[in-house]
Image (cartoon, helix red, strand yellow):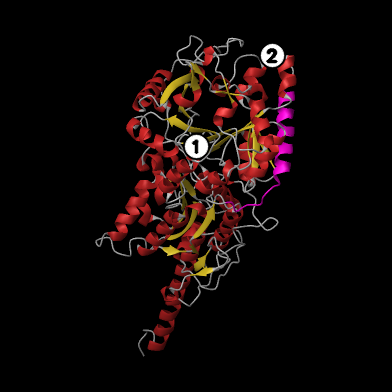
Amino acid sequence: MSSSSSPSTLTITTHLTLITLLTAATSYFFYKSRRLKLQSLIPNSTPSRKPKLIYISQTGTSKTLAHRLHTLLASNNLFFDILDANNYEPEELHKETVVLIVVSTWEDGKPPSSGRFFGNWLLESVSDFRVGNLLLSGVKFAVFGVGSRVYEETYNVVGREFSKGMRALGGTEILGFCEGDVDGGELDEVFDEWSRNVVEVLKGGVEGNGGYVCDASDEEVVDEDEDDYDDEEEDGEGGEEGIVDLEDIAGRGPSRNFVVEVKKVNGKVNGAKEMVTPVIRASLVKQGYKIIGSHSGVKLCRWTKSQLRGRGGCYKHSFYGIESHRCMEATPSLACANKCVFCWRHHTNPVGKSWQWKMDDPLDIVNTAIDLHTKMIKQMKGVPGVKAERLQEGLSPRHCALSLVGEPIMYPEINLLVDELHQRRISTFLVTNAQFPEKIKALRPITQLYVSVDAATKASLKAVDRPLFGDFWERFLESLKSLREKKQRTVYRLTLVKGWNTEEIDAYYNLFDVGDPDFIEIKGVTYCGSSATSKLTMENVPWHADVKSFSEALAEKSKGVYEVACEHVHSCCVLLAKVDKFKINGQWFTWIDYEKFHDLVAAGKPFDSKDYMAPTPSWAAYGAEEGGFDPKQIRYKKERHHKAK
């Protein structure tokens, strides 16, 4: 016989060799797989591409939420790069494995400026037939939208479009689109719930859920495109506990078996939600507000402090004779229906188009406001320059400026609140933003009723006030018409913003006949510092000379119906007044006889603005040497030492 091996021996040898090679290969691939898993957790390692957490934020809310999620992910051994969309190149999106996006919806249903390029790229890619629907086929993603439900049809539209666009390009949504309402009171709760779900999916405890949608509504919403996903679940075993391979997660298909129950967004408190959420409360308190109950506020004005020290009062002292050190600045509604570009509260207050919150008693609001105000006055004791007699007078407020922040006329019991103030012989200066004409009509006598006229054309009003109402212009005009029906003192308040509304003299004049106001206040916008919510800079702030020129031009347009009556140089403010009512024998009567007003209210008989007017002092008249500064006060000029840049 030949010394060569038999066929059966060769077969056995071959099989053993193949088994050995397969075992070696399996061991090698297992080793490589374990090494990749561990590399993703070792700080000094260089993984191929870290997952991305991208935020698109205007006011900082989405940025804050994204950083909170980033911290949660890291605490669960899930390491992401966190980026502002402005610093991310969307052309790189197809190279990613996992992408989480937290995005805000801003003006007119558009993304914030930092996300415009990203949004445009996504939109163009979806509509470009050359791109196709497989561009993001290797990308797993989830989107959380941040917006305000009061904008109705544009509520979180950007987040929805991002989610839809990435799916259209082949991306796989590991969690359905989720959204939060910044004015709903439970944004944090909804976002934290979504974040925990994201972590659970990424850690592999569940298989993902392309069908689950965290919608800000009462019911769960489920994606009906079930045929897009495989029925078969994968193994999901990720090796040792605590080791998470995000590349493995990226390769998994979503499952329909993961269902999460999310609490309702519109939380209820005694049958209605709180207007002031903990986040809003913290922000307002930081700015010096004293919050009253669930929707009101009071704050000590800087002019109150100034007159307590004998350093001069505000323009209302010069124009109307109020005592600034006895004036309480308050509001029964911190919510507003506009988001004006010059808002000096930087939009930290809530917004809304109707009253939808828990409501506090008007008596409680007035009592608490006076109590908090007097406590703040007492705290001025011992401050250098504060005069004892002024401090004592300040403890008994005689005026209430219902113009602190928000829209006071939204408060359903505004009439009862005003009555309560008048019964205490506290005068009322109420400011409304001209979006609630029916509320103006229903108002009882106010000492002086203001309507903000922030622009004179539909386009500019939309740009300046950024109103919530779609029919904002019609509401604006109806509000002016409602003002015309009032018998007590009425005022148009114009805030001049250079480059926005200072060129509309003819259009402003055309509005005079609509509301026929007694007075027109024209004031330069106050610059309140940099803010993500405002595009204004010092370039937009007019000089007093600019305000004077604008006022003189308006008075000239009226052909003698109005004249420039007063000015307050320090406030960059000028007053136009009706000549036939308030100028008698060459003497202006723009001041108010407050005691007479209270007597007229108490009498309960009809009266008008001429029944409680008082003479204007010469130092307050337009063109006077004092420039509206009370000569009984001592002018104090702060020395500023700005370092050269």
Looking at the image, residue 259 lies above or below residue 515:
below
Report whether 59 appears left or right of 8: right
Query: Where is residue 198 drawn, in percent x and y?
Result: 54, 59
| Viewer-nearest residue: 622 or 585 | 585
Secondary structure, magenta segment, majority class: helix
Report whether 108 appears left or right of 305: left
Which residue is pictured at 74% across the width and 29% down the height? 375
Query: Where is residue 621 drawn, in percent x and y?
Result: 49, 15
Q: Is residue 243 visible?
A: no
Which residue is pictured at 59% across the width and 19% down the height? 313
Q: Is residue 109 visible?
A: yes
Tell me the SS state at disc 1.
strand
Q: Residues within 10 Å of mark 2 (few under 14, many from 20)?
A: few
Please state, as top left, top right, bottom left or bottom right, where the C terminus lies in the image. Answer: top left
Please state, as top left, top right, bottom left or bottom right, where the N terminus lies in the image. Answer: bottom left
| Type of the residue with mark 2 | Pro
Report whether 197 appears left or right of 470: right
**Extreme-bottom residue of the structure:** 1
| Viewer-nearest residue: 75 or 313 | 313
Q: Which residue is mark 1?
A: 451
Q: Is residue 598 magenta?
A: no
Tell me the SS state at disc 2.
loop
Residue range in magenta is 355-380
**Mark linked to residue 384:** 2
Q: CA distance from mark 1 to mark 2?
A: 37 Å
| Type of the residue with mark 1 | Val
Q: Is residue 373 magenta?
A: yes
| Viewer-nearest residue: 458 or 199 | 458
Question: Are dots 1 and 2 in contact, CB under 8 Å?
Answer: no
Where, by quadrant of the figure, is residue 448 drawn? top right
